[in-house]
Image (spheres, coloured by chain):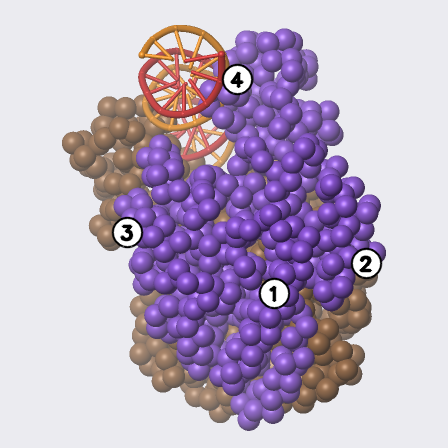
Chain colours: A purple, B brown, C red, D orange
DNA sequence: CGATTTGTGTGTATACATTTG
DNA sequence: TCAAATGTATACACACAAATC
């Protein structure tokens, strides 16, 4: 993080006193916004302390607090008590990851797709579904949270991951991301705080930012988030929720150990946090990893929203995820589902249902696991030292050293023909000591292409 | 609206001084919340003025302002400068309308479905789509805003309503409601204000409430919202956007006249409002109503989000809507789409596309129009006096008199065997002088059932 | 129509918490 | 370990705006 070298020198930003109109705080905020958006104030720049700027402008310092707060709400700046106020690293740009606009020239090791090679099985099943006698029943407004047999199939599917619930406390929604959006809108207010891993799912970061929900990064180790650190933060500030991907963290590939789950659950219970458990990788972990016992939902059923998307495990194009939640959260979540989606396509849900009931879903999962295994083996040919982390993950987390500028690394690699994402993109806070790259293994059309991409990467890093 | 009769008497709410802990404003807010949620303070009750309560508690009155503001943000109370602060009519309950949980004993004249009788045509087309050679292309993460040919078909569809745009400035999303959620999250901040008709789409009211966006009701006449009133409100407070359904307002069935559109556009342009144009009823109006010229998007292409859902016109179960927007809004909207949906099911979009390209969509529309015409004729047999309003609307707006209690009317009618919605449910503000019922004509399985429902209604009202 | 009531917006004073050195 | 630097939270004073009578 670039630190302003004029620390005790003339202030890094001196707004023109003449430009200052009443109300002061609005005027100051918009001057600052212009300055940042135009690039005159670079990311990482330390802004003048509130009292200093106030002295300079000859107003009360809490008026500056207010101006800064406005810019903070827009994500332009961030503040650390004791240290100062800084321009955000991502002030001008956004870090959302989507499959849109990938230059076809590039090998994509950035966006994590889902080994789409198994979609022929899905295509077959689609044909079966449309031959059903009740096809027309799938085309109306009814059953906004899913048809009863679809919900039952979903519960059935999740039972193999250790989930026990009933149709009343679950809903079918349009994908994991959609489920997260629903949960955030339903259960949190602007200004609320949610604890996350230091490195977390980039789209969750963006979603929270859009909804003005603050993320509080909590340090972790190889077994996941540290309960002590979570406890500390909960005591220090008012934290309302926590976001975890216990089966395989994105981007770190960390699986939370069972004993760690227990410890975290204790803290979460004590502070009555709402747990958002994104278990999109359950299919790679439950029944496979020896230490796996159960999802955290089973430890905290009353205060958890369990989200089980089928995009990675079954089919990415059919937008289906299951949400399971405690009775106490039910009303608000259903409300939010009606307000954001009205309903999820019954046709998509029916295809997923048929895949599950016919056993084809397991076939797909097993094929994807094989593909993942092969891809991971290839990866390990190139980067053998990186032994920790999930063995079947669709992506890997590669520590890099010596290269200081994140933007440059990514741009260089794109020039060289591969797309990857730098760890900065996954930072929920502002501290970045180490550097990593997230390497997607599931988006190339063949192992050969993957090999080609990794070759380029290895060459660049050496 | 019930007015507290103790106006100049002991205050309607006297919090216990001993219960007051620091921080005062939080303590006061939570006491008030408990009181309201437990029903001890009834909806409509006037709360003590800020100064009076402050005197009583012996603290500064702006601390009361803050406590009240917190409850206001939660929708528990509302305030009118000069008049006082009141408990919200809907403090405890929500007004979202969905197809969930309709007692099968009841004839549904509440939820507006879409004459689902035409879904056999859709079912046929589904079969055609799955025989396509490129079915597998519909099952992956690609093209999150729609495949190029799907977007082209959408533009083609909207051209008949008068929309001219290009693929870059449009996106396929998961239904109109989803489009509204995306637009609100993308383009507005918590605390922003949006102008709406006095009576407006109930789910939009809820959505705005959930996102802490304030609605400002603007009076209208038979030709739509009054430009002068809009102008007034814009000058008085800081308004950021406006929500309109020009082709056929929900619930009022008002079609905004072309000259009114021009006048409103002038005000909207002057104050740089973002226009959210929900044109779900375009298919009932464009090319049919003699006065119809064009959507408002064409008058204000740079500052409008045009939303064209296919749920009412083509098929309700396939969750597809088109969003068209100005270049300036593009980046933020795409961002929000990725964050809320990732993508919309390409399969659903493909079916809608095929329906449009094959001409079946027009067939469906024409069938739905016939059904709407028949249903409206039946309605007019029962309620002939109600001549104004859209001739083909899927619902009607029935003025009622003499019956004072909204909850009772609705409960009575449910008892009698029909579900309807009272105008209070559609109030964007708090003023309710007249009373209406919205009567859905499109949700019964037959005209006979509709007739049965209207019979019950007429009997009750006479 | 002008005084009064009542809510809103803006700037300020003060106590406090966290980080850094 | 403590003091200085720095941001945060809370309460207050005052000018203003809108509605009411």
Q: Chain of mark 3?
A: B
Which residue is depicted at the point 50% across and 88% down?
B445
Question: Where, quadrant-wise, is the C terminus of chain A in this rendering?
Answer: top right
| Residue lying furthest left | B18
Q: Are marks 1 and 4 in contact (CB under 8 Å)?
A: no
Give the residue pinned by disc 1. A372
Q: Is residue B52 above or below residue B296?
A: above
Give the residue pinned by disc 2. A104
Q: Chain of mark 2?
A: A
Q: Nearer the viewer, residue A395 or B263?
A: A395
Q: Chain of mark 4?
A: A
CA distance separating discs 3 and 2:
57 Å
Q: Nearer the viewer, mark 1 or mark 4?
A: 1
Whether residue A324 sits left or right of residue B336 in the image: it is left
Q: Nearer the viewer, mark 2 or mark 4?
A: 2
Q: Nearer the viewer, mark 3 or mark 1?
A: 1
CA distance separating discs 2 and 1:
23 Å
CA distance separating discs 3 and 1:
52 Å
Q: Is residue B281 above or below residue B359?
A: above
Of callouts 2 and 1, the N-terminal one: 2
Q: Nearer the viewer, mark 3 or mark 4?
A: 4
């Amino acid at each position: 993080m670039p630190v302003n070298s004029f620390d005790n020198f003339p202030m890094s930003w001196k707004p023109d006193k003449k430009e200052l109109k009443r109300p002061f705080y609005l005027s100051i905020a918009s001057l600052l916004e212009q300055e940042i958006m135009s690039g005159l104030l670079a990311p990482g720049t330390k802004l003048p302390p509130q009292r200093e700027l106030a002295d300079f402008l000859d107003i009360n310092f809490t008026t500056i607090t207010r101006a800064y707060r406005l810019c903070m709400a827009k994500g332009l700046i961030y503040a650390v008590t004791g240290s100062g106020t800084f321009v955000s690293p991502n002030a001008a740009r956004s870090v959302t990851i989507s499959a849109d606009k990938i230059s076809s020239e590039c090998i994509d090791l950035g966006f994590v797709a889902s080994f789409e090679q198994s979609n022929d099985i899905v295509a077959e099943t689609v044909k079966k579904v449309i031959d059903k006698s009740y096809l027309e029943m799938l085309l109306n407004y009814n059953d906004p949270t899913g048809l009863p047999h679809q919900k039952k199939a979903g519960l059935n599917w999740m039972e193999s991951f250790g989930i026990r619930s009933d149709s009343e406390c679950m809903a079918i929604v349009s994908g994991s991301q959609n489920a997260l959006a629903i949960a955030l809108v339903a259960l949190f207010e602007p200004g609320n705080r949610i604890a996350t891993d230091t490195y977390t799912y980039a789209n969750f970061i963006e979603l929270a930012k859009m909804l003005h929900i603050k993320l509080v990064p909590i340090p972790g180790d190889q077994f996941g988030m540290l309960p002590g650190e979570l406890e500390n933060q909960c005591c220090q500030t008012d934290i309302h929720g926590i976001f975890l991907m216990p089966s395989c963290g994105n981007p770190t590939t960390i699986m939370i150990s069972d004993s760690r789950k227990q410890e975290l659950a204790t803290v979460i219970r004590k502070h009555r946090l709402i747990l958002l458990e994104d278990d999109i990788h359950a299919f790679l972990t439950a029944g496979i990893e020896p230490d796996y016992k159960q999802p955290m939902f089973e430890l905290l059923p009353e205060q958890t929203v369990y989200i089980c998307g089928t995009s990675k495990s079954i089919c990415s194009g059919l937008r289906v995820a299951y949400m399971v939640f405690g009775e106490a959260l039910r009303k608000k979540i259903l409300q939010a589902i009606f307000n954001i989606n009205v309903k999820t396509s019954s046709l998509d849900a029916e295809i997923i249902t048929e895949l599950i009931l016919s056993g084809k879903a397991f076939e797909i999962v097993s094929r994807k696991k094989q593909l993942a295994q092969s891809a991971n083996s290839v990866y390990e040919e190139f980067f053998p030292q990186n032994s920790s982390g999930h063995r079947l993950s669709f992506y890997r987390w590669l520590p890099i050293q010596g290269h200081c500028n994140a933007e440059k690394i990514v741009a260089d690699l794109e020039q060289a023909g591969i797309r990857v994402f730098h760890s900065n993109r996954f930072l929920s806070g502002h501290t970045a000591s180490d550097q990593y790259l997230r390497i997607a293994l599931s988006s190339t059309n063949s192992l050969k292409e993957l090999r080609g991409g990794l070759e380029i990467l290895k060459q660049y890093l050496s």
